[in-house]
Image: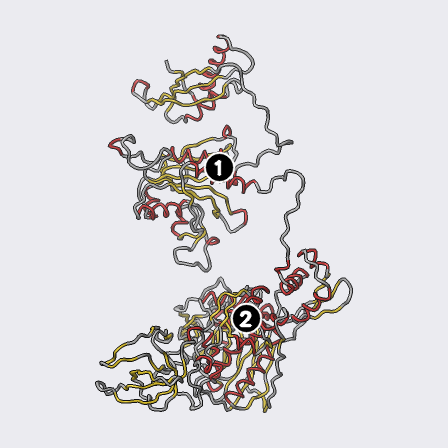
Amino acid sequence: MKFTLSWLKDHLETDATLEQICEKLTAIGLEVEDVDDRAVFKPFTIAKIVTAEKHPEADRLKVLSVDKGDGKLIQIVCGAPNARTGLIGALAEPGTYVPGIDVTLGVGKIRGVESHGMMCSEKELMVSEDHNGIIDLPADAPLGTSYAAYAGLDDPVIEINLTPNRPDCTGVYGIARDLAAAGLGTLKAAKAPAFKVEGKTPVEVKLDFAADDTHLCPGFALRLVRGVKNGPSPAWMQKRLKAIGLRPINALVDITNYMTFDQARPLHVFDAAKVAGNLVVRRAKPKLEWDTGPISDDQYAEFTAAGGPPFRLTSEWRIDPALNIKIADAEIGRWEEEVILALDGREYPLTQNNVVIADDKGVESIAGIMGGEHSGCDENTVDVLIESALWDPLNIAKSGREHGIITDARYRFERGVDPDYMVAGLERATELVLELCGGVAAEANVVGYAGYRAKVVDFPVSEVKRLTGIDVPASESREILVKLGFGVEGSGDVLQVSVPSWRPDVDGKADLVEEVLRIHGVDQVKAQPLDSHGAVNGKILTTLQIRTRAAKRALASRGMGEAVTWSFIPSEHAALFGGGSAALKLSNPIAADMSDMRPSLLPGLLSAAQRNAARGYGDVALFEVSGTYESDRPEGQRRVAGGVRRGTATLAGSGRMWSNGKSGGGKPADVFDAKADALAVLEACGMPMGNVQIEKGGPDWYHPGRSGTIKMGPKVILGTFGEFHPKALDALDVGGALCGFEVYIDAIPEPKKKATKTKPVLELSPFQAVRRDFAFVVDKSVEAGAIIRAAASADRKLIGAVNVFDIFEGASLGADKKSVAIEVTIQPAERTLTDEDFDGLTKRIIANVEKTTGGTLRA
């Protein structure tokens, strides 16, 4: 929101400096984002042309002698056709930056004659677009003084960063009201408009909505002004609009823009001569057009009876404009969408979600967002219809986003304008039209508006102390609220506060506390240390938060770099990794290739690894711990730790080295690296590793023979890992040796609650561990994990660990057979084992493995 200092002082009587105003604005929550003190215009001075002689080498140039008030003449070469002796204008000397042409002047020679500066045109000083001659000031213009001060170009421009809950401050008057409440001046009372009304506005307005749609337009006011003369707006208005970045168009349009920024009241003007019949406010709808004209009620009945689709207007049902319908072998009909040519010169096809203002010929305006080109006002406008209406904020936001239209009107309506100023705003706009364009005003047509019923909030004044820690006297709280426009009744500990119409964001007592605090001064809140509880605090973070941090730390310690990728991915990538459902498609994606919520972290990580490879960093290991989306329900969001390794980025290091494999090439990352990463995450998150089971194979995006699934029991899947399928990599346009994993952190069971946080006593056996080796011949289909589990179950107390150390396949074993060698660590705890103990344990190990896997002990 931008405004000039003089504009603010139209509504605020104050002696405060620019610095004090900016400081106070930020203090009361209207953060100042930028201040343009207009210093760029300060070097320009008012000067007089003493002589104007023809240039000796150019017919269209003149050599001027210019006096800036000190009696010293300055020589300037000028090509302006109106340059003449006695003209008073704006002088720019060497070293001056000229903003209109983005040039810093110097001393130069033009056709052999030195020129020490220039006399400026209005375009060069950004006063207007006029560049046909230099500025021609009145004879009484004071020589040697600042042209910026004389022309009002030294008016500072303030830009504030508004939060969405302050629609009242999208107008300068609302900002002035806040500053006055903060003690920085006195709010000037707005004078009630007074003008003569003759006759009635002949254009009727109908709000054509279903019973459940009346909220789309709670009120509409329209007035006809006859006999206007629409030309340029006055200089003061043009200067203010230009200062905030708006281009003046004509008086009628400029008045609506001025009201938008001055009073936060967007308006629209129609050329009455271009409006056919009465106005209807409704949802946009497709039309069934016939070769012989619009369909009649009888034809429509015949059409539906003949089996045509019913005339339903729902967001799910889309109409094919190319669909031709034949009825009774006679007439041909077509569905046609309503289209509007808007003021920005673009055509917008309208859907039934859009509210429009239409006349007998069709749509004239997208309600609350942008008017139509057809009924726009120009220099030929004689009779004008001024519209002031109320629109549903949510519908305005959705319609504006649907069409990608960003306007100052939309910005205000989607935040909520003052409903009680709808008619008053029309009155003020009418007064400006009569003042600047002349004409005669008719009586206004007001439909739909039922008046404003103020919300009343019970406000215990003690809440200020309780919520802020500041003891603000009740009298000061009352005074602040009254100055802000709230109605306050009652005198006890609880006040009854009525909320003004321009504050839709205030709903409860906490909102009133905020109002009191920001005006009293947030800087009055004293910094205080947190109270000590005199004891060690309990756990603050949730289990999921703790595990997220632990997973990140574990992966970073394994040489992987953390990446943050988009939660949105292309629909093809989503479908490839198990997603792509309609519920997870974005209705308004920020880019065409970010259309779906990601079902997996891997597409983003693979793309990131490929981008690194394209820039010469092929050996990368990346991880991310974030959310994935399986449905649009809260339970469909998962917390996942995922990672990929590319090239030689293994735990042992990456790149070429004489000790790394053949010919110095590093060993490529493979399925076992991905498995180790996944298991490291599970262990860091506190998963009991004895309960982890690994099954062969994984999702389709992994290589079927080089992937695995990590489970706990038959149903709970903890994660997947493996090398990627070539088809998946081709679809992602990714290449190279790649492996990856995903661990579902939220699938890990919650740890059991313990009665104490104290760690158990460390118990170490005084007896030496003994290791025994076994080799079993089993079918190739038997997993090594099954052998490990079978051996470990022979005696849980004595067997400390079981590890595979060799796998052998050969013709001597037989077809489809393999030998798996395991090392069993036996750890006595109570006594030294005898030979009989070892023999018994050995027999139980062999029996368990043979029974479970069908294998035999290898001789």
Residue in the picture at 51% in, 41% down: 548
Asked whether 93 or 575 is in front, the reply is 93
Q: Using the numbered discs, state the Cα–Cα distance from disc 1 to disc 2 in whole angstroms.
A: 52 Å
| Relative image position of residue 625 (x, y in whole percent) | 47, 43
| Relative image position of residue 309 (x, y in whole percent) | 47, 66
Label total for image: 2
Check residue 170 in the rendering and tell me which mark sits there, or answer none.
2
* 196 left or right of 364 in image: right
Residue in the picture at 45% in, 23% down: 788
Q: Secondary structure at mark 2?
A: helix
| Relative image position of residue 285 (x, y in whole percent) | 48, 71
Asked whether the viewer can see residue 361, the reply is no
Query: Where, by quadrant of the figure, is residue 764 drawn?
Result: top right
* 674 left or right of 655 in image: right
Q: Amino acid at mark 2?
A: Thr
- The residue carrying mark 1 is 718
Residue 289 sits above or below residue 69 on the image: above
Disc 2 crowd, CA 10 A, few/some/many (<14, 14-19, 20+) = many
Q: Amino acid at mark 1?
A: Leu
